[in-house]
Image (cartoon, rainbow, N blue to C red):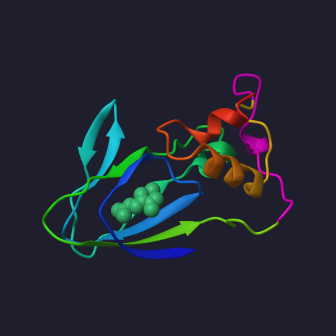
Amino acid sequence: MSTARVNSGTSKHADNDFITVLLQDHIGGLQVLHQNKWIDVPPVHGALVVNIGDLLQLISNERFKSIEHRVLANSVGPRVSVASFFSTGMLPLGRLYGPIKELLSEDNPPKYRETTIREYNAHFIEKGLDGTSALTHFEL
Ligand SMILES: O=C(O)CCC(=O)C(=O)O
Ligand SMILES: [Fe+2]
């Protein structure tokens, strides 16, 4: 699913998908949380930003970690971004997603229970962007 928008900012969150591909304009404002510090992601003309989302963290059993990010509002002017979210969204699919079996071992037991994307999304939406991870709810 793709969303194009003119926005002023978003509060801290990780995306509720597998991967997000993001095109931001020259205004900037996107920041990622790295070692507890907010780091600017400066716009690079012609470049795309690829963010790991919660669902990739879940199926990789945390081999890949979703990135907490936010967009700061600034007074320079309207900011346009185009985000493509790779997920099945709210489609009523019953498929279960959990840590990929081949990645698991005695030393790497599953960290999350299986869930449907629909159930995960419903929790993500109900919880809201309160700064906490929606994945905590699915931890074993
Ligand atoms: O507009 C952006 O650069 C990012 C927006 C975002 O984080 C989102 O829509 O999930
Ligand atoms: Fe996001």
Identify which residue is drawn at 40% across, 67% down: 22
Q: Is residue 99 magenta?
A: yes
Residue that protrudes farthest toward the right in the picture: 94
Q: Residue at x 56, y 47 (%)?
A: 128
Taking depth in this image into account, of 18 and 10 the one nearest to the observer is: 10
Question: Is 21 situated above or below 98?
Answer: below
Taking the spot 52% from the left edge, 41% from the top edge, the residue there is 65
**Ligand 1 shows up in which quadrant of the image?**
bottom left
In this view, the residue in front, 87 or 9, is 9
**Residue closer to the observer: 133 or 112:** 133
Q: Horizontal placement of 56 versus 140: left or right?
A: left
Image height of 73 relative to 36, above or below: below
Q: Is residue 23 left or right of residue 106?
A: left
Residue 7 percent location from the top left of the image = 33, 67
Q: In the displayed structure, does residue 51 sit left or right of residue 119?
A: left
- Give the residue furthest to the top: 107
Q: Is residue 50 visible?
A: no
Which range is magenta? Answer: 93-109
**Image coords of residue 33 (percent x, y):** 35, 40
* Location of residue 129 in the rendering, given as x and y in whole percent from the top left corner: 50, 46
99 relative to 16, above or below: above
Is most of the magenta stretch helix, strand or loop? loop
**Residue 101 appears in the rendering:** yes
Residue 94 in the magenta stretch? The answer is: yes
Q: Position of residue 46 (x, y in %)?
A: 27, 76
Quarter holding the N terminus is bottom right
Image quadrant occupied by the C terminus: top right
